[in-house]
């Protein structure tokens, strides 16, 4: 395991044991710190989530996409316990849940690609994938703009 991967592996091991479980967005923040982001750069991750809604205000549902600030790859919300799948997207009752689901999918894919996970530590019910197997992102609404600015880690 490379030094930059150690933080993720340790976090996943603790999560498996039920120790220090951090929400997916917090764990993703730590993953980018381990990849060489400065604290200032990692704090910009919040701008790499794109969230949209459907439904009337009293029944609104949220779906999110996380855009990797290093590669530009998009990770749509994964399927967690409280998600509803329809229309090619996973919908949640609030923005925080949908953003955590996008972070969870990102973390699952990162771990899968490093071959650090045999699936037992997978956060989402749907399967992770390799970059070249990235599923087509169903079209966001016309007013949704996905981030395009990439960030090069300061601490590499």
Image: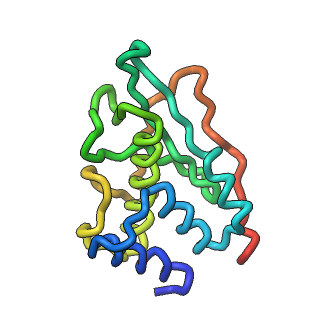
The relative height of residue 28 versus residue 116 in the rendered view (above or below) is: above
Colouring rule applied to residues: rainbow
The relative height of residue 59 versus residue 140 in the rendered view (above or below) is: above
| Res. 111 image quadrant | bottom left
The relative height of residue 126 versus residue 98 in the rendered view (above or below) is: below
Q: In this view, does 31 lie to the left or right of 126?
A: right
Taking the spot 42% from the left edge, 33% from the top edge, the residue there is: 94
Q: Quadrant of the N terminus?
A: bottom left
| Res. 122 image quadrant | bottom left
Taking the spot 42% from the left edge, 57% from the top edge, the residue there is: 23
How many numbered circles does the render carry? 0
Q: Quadrant of the C terminus?
A: bottom right
| Res. 60 image quadrant | top left
Residue nearest the viewer, comparing 27 with 136: 27
- Residue 24 percent location from the top left of the image: 43, 57
- Residue 97 percent location from the top left of the image: 40, 42
């Amino acid at each position: 395991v490379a030094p930059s991967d150690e933080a993720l592996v340790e976090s996943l091991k603790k999560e498996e044991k039920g120790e220090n479980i951090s929400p997916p967005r917090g764990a993703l923040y730590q993953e980018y710190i381990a990849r060489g982001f400065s604290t200032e750069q990692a704090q910009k991750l919040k701008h790499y989530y794109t969230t949209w809604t459907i439904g009337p205000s009293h029944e609104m549902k949220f779906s999110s996409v996380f855009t990797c600030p290093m590669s530009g790859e998009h990770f749509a919300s994964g399927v967690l316990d409280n998600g509803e799948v329809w229309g090619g997207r996973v919908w949640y009752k609030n923005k925080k849940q949908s953003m955590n689901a996008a972070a969870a999918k990102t973390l699952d894919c990162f771990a899968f690609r490093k071959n650090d996970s045999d699936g037992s530590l997978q956060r989402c019910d749907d399967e992770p994938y390799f970059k070249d197997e990235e599923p087509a992102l169903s079209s966001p609404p016309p007013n949704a703009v996905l981030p395009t600015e990439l960030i090069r880690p300061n601490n590499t």
